[in-house]
Image (spheres, helix red, strand yellow):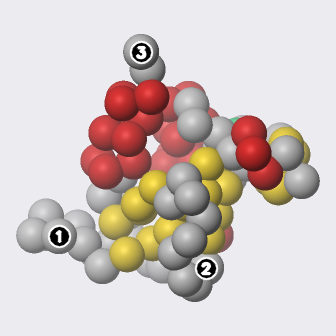
Amino acid sequence: MRTCVGCRHRDEQAALLRVVGEEPGPTGMPWEVVPDPRRRSQGRGAYVHPDPACVRLATERRAFGRALRRSGRPDIRALEAWLGQQET
Ligand SMILES: [Zn+2]
């Protein structure tokens, strides 16, 4: 069981998307939240429901930064793009 950093509800790991913090691309943002659906990236990860509402909550609460030990507002466009691709 893992806790979603957005809605804070606990859920099975398979129901949650792992994300990691990475150095950003040329965006000017301090860091970037990147989806890690296969849970293969090294280092600290956080879990969020693959749901735009949970991502929004996590962003508003700055929960990604707390969970991933990074400061400043992250670029979440890669995460949003990944979510968009899941909707079919
Ligand atoms: Zn959630």
| Displayed quadrant of residue 72 | bottom left
SS for callout 3: loop
Mark 2, residue position: 44
Task: Name the residue carrying label 1.
Answer: 25
User: Which of disc 3 and disc 1 is earlier in sequence?
Assistant: 1
Q: Which residue is mark 3?
A: 88
Q: Amino acid at mark 1?
A: Gly
- Mark 2 falls on what kind of element? loop
Q: CA distance from mark 3 to mark 2?
A: 30 Å
Taking the image as drawn, is residue 46 in sight? yes
* Rendered location of residue 33, percent (x, y): 41, 61
Residue closest to the eye, 72 or 49: 49
Q: Residue 26: which quarter of the image?
A: bottom left
Residue under the point 55% across and 83% down: 42
Q: Residues within 10 Å of mark 3 (few under 14, many from 20)?
A: few
The answer to which of marks 1 and 2 sits earlier in the sequence is 1
Single out the residue that lies furthest toward the left. 26
- The residue positioned farthest toward the bottom in the image shown: 43
Three-letter code, disc 2? Arg
Q: Is mark 3 within 8 Å of ligand 1?
A: no
Outermost residue to the top: 88
